[in-house]
Amino acid sequence: MLFTLAFLEAASVFAAVCVLIMMRQHPSMLGLGVPAAVAPALAVSGCCLVSFYYNDLYEVGALRDVKKVAPRLLQSLGLTFLLLGASETLLPGVKLSAPLLASTFLVVVGLVVPLRAVSHGLMTRRAAAQRVVILGTGPLACKIVEEIERAPRLPYSVVGMMDDGGPAAAPPWLSGALHPLPVRALEDMERLIGQLRPDRLVVALSERRGRLPVWTLLSSCATGLQVEDGIEFYERLTRKLAIESLRPSFLIFHRVLQKSRLQLAVRRTLSLAVAAAGLVLATPLMALVAVLVKLDSRGPVFFIQERVGLRGRIFRLIKFRTMQGDPPGDHDVWRRDDQSRLTRLGAWLRDQHLDELPQFFNVLKGDMDMVGPRPEMACNVQSMTEHIPYYGLRHTVRPGMTGWAQIKQGYALSQAEVTEKMRYDLYYIKHMSLWLDLRILLATARIVLFGRNA
């Protein structure tokens, strides 16, 4: 829905600005002004999209809470006209007079406000929380309840659970739940469904063999009740995979690891194009950073470290040096333990993500792609593989300069955080596509340029 809204807003603003310009130039012959109107209209619609995205107007919360929209919309319009001013300087074909800017302001408000009102109405109608009963009280069921209670914006409400352990007693972790949940034995499933009248059943049993109430689930489906696998439900909620509860059969039958040659070729082409363009644009900045690193502290400009890439191949990752006396490449150390050795410049380079710029060379060389799981130090991989489920599957794709886990989780400071990143990494591997890569690149650009998360 958010993508549709962004497209409708951009298309509406583009068309309206085209008409405005043509009416001012050729009131009686609108068609003659089309070529001259395209560049300014593209500039206005593009600046609107960037401004709206930066001010979080394409977040679900902004559609559901009307109070958030007005101030963000005003901020976005102000930023839009600042960007348009820069566009006139940088792009010769974009010329907008003061009267045209005023008309554009009114047009944008006149188009965006009704679209937002309709979107709010649709979102509010859809937001009536579905009543959910969860089959199971194990780790996966626990995660699902926690995620729903932690995010009130989700259109779900857990109204009951089925204890797959036998006795109808609430497990200890439910004591901290926001709302008391009735927990019944699995044998009482039909009675609980009749009492609670749920909209959806989520099957999150720890063990299904001999415990799955197949015929009750079939009859529930026949009455219109939605039945969903717990793994897939959790995946939809969180955009990550519950790796501790995954069975190998899920990965096999969902073809998580099977990607077409065409898909891989398109992704590789995108990576090469973005890396080449990024290297050209960043060369002056990289030269300046190299000089500053050399002046700031003694030591080499670049830090080279062995990382694990596609199919477990070891490659040499290039970064700008950010620490005094960097440890050798096989030294196992968490990022938090390095803070005392950061140089004055190094801390700033890390905060701005500028220390990663030399990795454009790794992408062009073929060691990495622009998007993918972040490559881990070779010395850590064996330990991670032993302690984190499916960790070795990260090496079925090229590592990336940025990735789904990077924009969702950030840097990992412990094994628990590496495990959380693995949940996102496996989600990315399952859903790997050109569209997802573009989305990640856009979110990364937002973080780097504006210092804000996606």
Image (spheres, grey):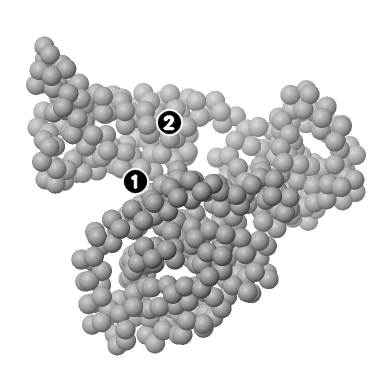
As drawn, is 185 to the left or to the right of 204? right
Relative to 404, is 119 above or below?
A: above
Q: Secondary structure at mark 2?
A: helix
Give the percent coordinates (x, y) of residue 426.
59, 55
Question: Count of labels shown?
Answer: 2
**Mark 1: amino acid:** Tyr
Q: Quadrant of residue 225?
A: top right
Q: Nearer the viewer, residue 24 or 192?
A: 24
Q: Secondary structure at mark 1?
A: helix
Q: Quadrant of residue 292?
A: bottom left
**Extreme top residue here?**
28
Give the percent coordinates (x, y) of residue 211.
88, 44
**Mark 2: amino acid:** Thr
Crowding at dot 1, Cα within 10 Å, few <14 / some 14-19 / many 20+, comes out as many
Crowding at dot 2, Cα within 10 Å, few <14 / some 14-19 / many 20+, comes out as few
Residue 177 visible to the viewer: no
**Extreme front residue here?**
261
Q: Which of the marked residues, 1 or 2, is nearer the chain's N terminus?
A: 2
Q: CA distance from mark 1 to mark 2?
A: 18 Å
Residue at left offset 29%, top offset 85%: 297
Q: Nearer the viewer, residue 208 or 296?
A: 208
Q: What number is the disc on residue 351?
A: none
Residue under pointer 2: 4
Q: Nearer the viewer, residue 338 or 357?
A: 357
Relative to 179, is 419 above or below?
A: below
Number of the front mark, 1 or 2: 2
Residue at left offset 44%, top offset 56%: 371
Give the percent coordinates (x, y) of residue 99.
11, 28
Q: Quadrant of residue 111?
A: top left
Residue under pointer 1: 54
Residue 241 visible to the viewer: yes
Relative to 429, is 327 above or below?
A: below
